[in-house]
Amino acid sequence: MLTDPLMQRALLAALLVGAAAPIVGTYLVQRRLSLLGDGIGHIALTGVALGWLVGAAMGLRPADALTIPGAVVVAVIGSVLIEVVRRRGRTSGDLALALMFYGGIAGGVLIIGLAGGTSGNLMAYLFGSISTVTVSDLVLTAVLSVIILAVGIGLRTALFAVSHDEEFAIASGLPVWLLNMAVAIVAALTVTVAMRVVGLLLVSALMIVPVAVAQQLTHSFRLTMGLASAVGVVVCIVGLSITYWHNVSPGATIVVLAIVVYLLAAMVRPLLHRRAALAQHDPHPDIPDDVRVPVATGSGGVSGATSGSGSGSGSGEECPS
């Protein structure tokens, strides 16, 4: 498998996509915009079709040489537009997402038919196909992945502040508008990077499900981001390896694997919490925490009684009467 140039390109693309997509997904989950990637994926199909149409009109070979650049341009424009609409509040975020869902998918199907594409070409972009990963696609994927990782990790502190509490970020003097635009643009780049591997309809799952897995097992933002990225890499590599031996959709296989990992993490989580509870211990075992409380007796005297969780064997500290 590793000697096949086709699989070499596909596995490298899967490695980059698996590492980058959950990084952006962590911010989307924090902002409760998990479906943003799905909306961008739908509108990116229009960019794929426009790139195909322009490439065919210019007589390029292959005719889909401009599909990724077209998807990048349209996805970025769409993500910026929805962020502007969301901030101005003239319509709800759900309505803006719905417009992107229906307009993007309908425009893509209509234009790709006019450009001479077939239903097989359309399915490859919607659900991913390892046979479509060319050398130029791999180079562009690597460049975009580096940009995504640089923004997602390099601006982690500021992006977390904006994603967690936007009003506090504004009060702190952070450039909230620019940071929100950065998240939207990076999400658009992630969608276009991942469309060759998992497809436009399933790319949102690769951004969100690994984050959900990590949230089952970790309690900090940094660890969640790191574990989500590792899970993304593993499911992408394993999923693509399965498609080499079996004729199944790579995108669907990767997403199903990610969901299986989530279910396993959900089952393991209670066991980890129980083990952590049992492992709780006295942080200062050298300091006696038992206190002898004076108790008045009927004869007017005072005797000691032990209070606390220790053994109460009389070795505890005695309060003066």
Image: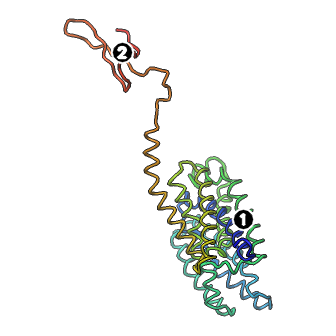
Q: Position of residue 99 (x, y in %)?
A: 55, 77
- Upstream in the sequence, badge 2 or badge 1? 1
Local packing at callout 1 (Cα closer than 10 Å; few below 14, some 14-19, many 20+) is many
The amino acid type found where label 2 is placed reads Gly
Of the pair 256 and 196, the residue shown nearer to us: 256
Q: Is residue 141 above or below residue 52?
A: above
Q: Quadrant of the N terminus?
A: bottom right
Q: Which mark is residue 10?
A: none
Q: Position of residue 248 (x, y in %)?
A: 57, 79
Q: Which mark is residue 314?
A: 2
Q: Position of residue 240 (x, y in %)?
A: 63, 72
Of the pair 7 and 190, the residue shown nearer to us: 7
Q: Quadrant of residue 89?
A: bottom right
Q: To which residue does mark 1 refer?
A: 145
The kind of secondary structure element at disc 1 is: helix
Q: Is residue 318 left or right of residue 68?
A: left
- Which residue is pictured at 47% across the width and 42% down the height? 276
Q: Quadrant of the C terminus?
A: top left
Label 2, label 1: how far apart the Cα atoms are: 65 Å
- Which residue is pictured at 65% across the width and 82% down the height? 46
Q: Position of residue 315 (x, y in %)?
A: 39, 15
- Which residue is pictured at 73% across the width and 58% down the height? 150
Q: Is residue 45 in view from this perspective?
A: yes
